[in-house]
Amino acid sequence: MTTSAIAVSGLRKAFGDKTVLDGIDLDVPAGTVFSLLGPNGAGKTTTVNVLTTLTKADGGTVRVAGHDVATEAKAVRSEIGVTGQFAAVDELLTGRENLQLMVDLSPVSAKDGKRIVTDLLERFDLVESADKAAATYSGGMRRKLDLAMTLVGNPRIIFLDEPTTGLDPRSRRTMWTIIRELLADGVTIFLTTQYLDEADELADRIAVLNKGKLVAEGTPDELKRLIPGTHVRFRFASFEDLDTAAQIMPDSTRDDDALTLRVPSDGGTKSVRALLDRLDEHSLDAEEFSVHTPDLDDVFLALTGHDTAEVVAK
């Protein structure tokens, strides 16, 4: 039985007369990546702030690492690490000094602390720049250092709030690799991001928050299946085969130049098999076929009414 790293029921929060979170329910299994998506102002940051004990909820129950955030805040803080969208490093200190500062603020012994600093510098590929001021680091290096500092206390649950915002594609990929390594170590990750490809790549489950309410939750594939437009694309060797296939699949859309046929489908195994059986019944053999589904951008737009490019630009 998989235990819950984070369990939220009926979470409510308002600021004045503005309701920011309106009855949120979440369950994040231990050792998974859970991504919370939503347009600006949807309540993502408020959710993270409540889960990390920075903001008190107005209602509902929230348990993180088995502890109630309202009555056991200290215990929750001992189990979690938080990395914000802006690297919280001291740029006047070197990378090593930043890590040592975190060690000094933790209950770790001096002997263990030195080992931890060395291990983290190696793990995050910061050895060569360890004794240089953080002000000289690139954005990607600062983010890596920030995450390394979060790991000093060996948290079992890590909250990553837009960890790759502003990074170049290579640095983003490096962060993805680090996140996968953390997951392999059994760490639970709660991720907010404005990059839907990032959520698609990393998350086991995704929740979409809009105007304070959860409007959808599921695996990336489950969410994509919510949106119409899934289809199977067949390519044929000849115009004659294409023409015959189009006749036996009247709802299809053909491309004569590419010799392809697009057939609406839910993309499931049974549906695809039925289409292939129909081709076999007419002695037709497609050179190739593939299932195409809407991506998370389509899902996001349909559920929130916001284009992701619009969200990123804000």
Image: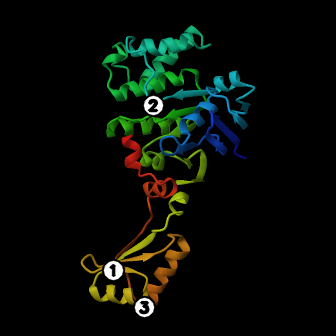
**Residue 187 visible to the viewer:** no
Residue 18 in picture, x, y percent from top left: 60, 38
Determine the residue positioned at 50% across, 11% down. 101
Q: Is residue 43 above or below residue 232?
A: above
Residue 211 in picture, x, y percent from top left: 56, 46
What amino acid type should be assigned to the residue bearing mark 2? Gln
Determine the residue positioned at 39% across, 90% down. 247
> Which badge, 2 or 1, is on the more N-terminal residue?
2
What amino acid type should be assigned to the residue bearing mark 1? Arg
Residue 292 in picture, x, y percent from top left: 42, 66
Tell me if 199 is positioned left or right of 23 in this view: left
Q: What colouring method underlies this structural image?
A: rainbow
Using a 10 Å C-alpha cutoff, classify the residue at mark 3 as few (fewer than 14 neighbours), some (14 to 19) or many (20 or more): few
Q: Is residue 262 above or below residue 12?
A: below
**Residue 162 visible to the viewer:** yes
Instruction: Label 1, secondary structure: give it.
Output: strand
Instruction: Label 2, secondary structure: give it.
Output: loop
Identify which residue, 217 or 273, lies in the foreground.
217
Q: Which residue is mark 3?
A: 282
Tell me if 30 is positioned left or right of 247 in this view: right
Q: Which residue is mark 1?
A: 254
Residue 19 in picture, x, y percent from top left: 62, 40
Q: Label 3 to label 1, Cα distance in Å?
A: 18 Å
Q: Label 2 to label 1, Cα distance in Å?
A: 46 Å
Number of marks present in the image shown: 3
